[in-house]
Image: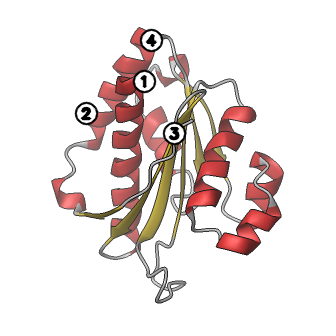
Amino acid sequence: MQVTSFTLRYNAGMSGDKVALVQQLAEQLLKRQQKVCTAESCTGGLIAKTLTDLAGSSDWFERGFVTYSNAAKNEMLGVPASIIEDYGAVSEPVATAMARGALDHSRASLAVAVTGIAGPGGGSDEKPVGTVWIAVASDDELIANRYQFGGNREAVRAATLVAALEGLIDLVDSD
């Protein structure tokens, strides 16, 4: 298992078209006969919704978990409460545990997990509004990235969506 972490400044306006990203991901998944699942906190199901907006997505989208509360992360994905207590819900250990938990609780071969602070409140000096951890996972690879998105709540969630799609595409390409 590989874990990679870094901080990236991201401009949602330069991300490209989300529909084209979903179509690209769908083609890659179909070609490889793989399915994907999502584990979402700060996006509240936006990634799963965007994936399933594409007709025929049932051929490659397995399921989505909306785990907004810490209890949901624990109960639905098996994220240990001690990890949430020690690192906070918006952290690399929680994002990676969410991704692994999504794989463990689904029939998908790929997962994406997002946890972050969309705002306008909830930020701190250590984790300001716009801080998002995104983890993508397969059976043999796990990659977690920290992002610092700008803008309002909607902009943070939209940027998270695009970064999650790009992360999934990169993961599928690496297989």
Which is more foreground, mark 2 or mark 3?
A: 3
Q: SS class of the residue under badge 2? A: helix
Q: From the viewer's side, name the closer residue of 163 and 83.
A: 83
Q: Position of residue 153 (x, y in %)?
A: 41, 73
Gap in angstroms between the C-alphas marked 2 and 3: 28 Å
Which is more foreground, mark 3 or mark 4?
A: 3
User: Disc 4 marks which residue?
Assistant: 32
Q: SS class of the residue under badge 4? A: helix
Placement of 29 over or under 21, stated as above or below: above
Q: Position of residue 87 (x, y in %)?
A: 66, 71
Q: Amino acid at mark 3?
A: Gln
**Which labelled disc corresponds to residue 28?**
none
User: Disc 3 marks which residue?
Assistant: 2
User: Disc 2 marks which residue?
Assistant: 20
Quadrant the C terminus occupies: top left
Gap in angstroms between the C-alphas marked 3 and 4: 21 Å
Gap in angstroms between the C-alphas marked 1 and 2: 13 Å
Q: Residue 80 is drawn in which quadrant?
A: bottom right
**Which labelled disc corresponds to residue 55?**
1
Q: Amino acid at mark 2?
A: Ala
Tag 4 and tag 1, C-beta contact below 8 Å: no
Which is more foreground, mark 2 or mark 4?
A: 4
Gap in angstroms between the C-alphas marked 3 and 1: 33 Å
Mark 3 vs 1, N-terminal side: 3
Q: Amino acid at mark 1?
A: Ala
Q: From the viewer's side, name the closer residue of 64 and 99.
A: 99
Gap in angstroms between the C-alphas marked 2 and 4: 18 Å
Furthest-bottom residue in this view: 125
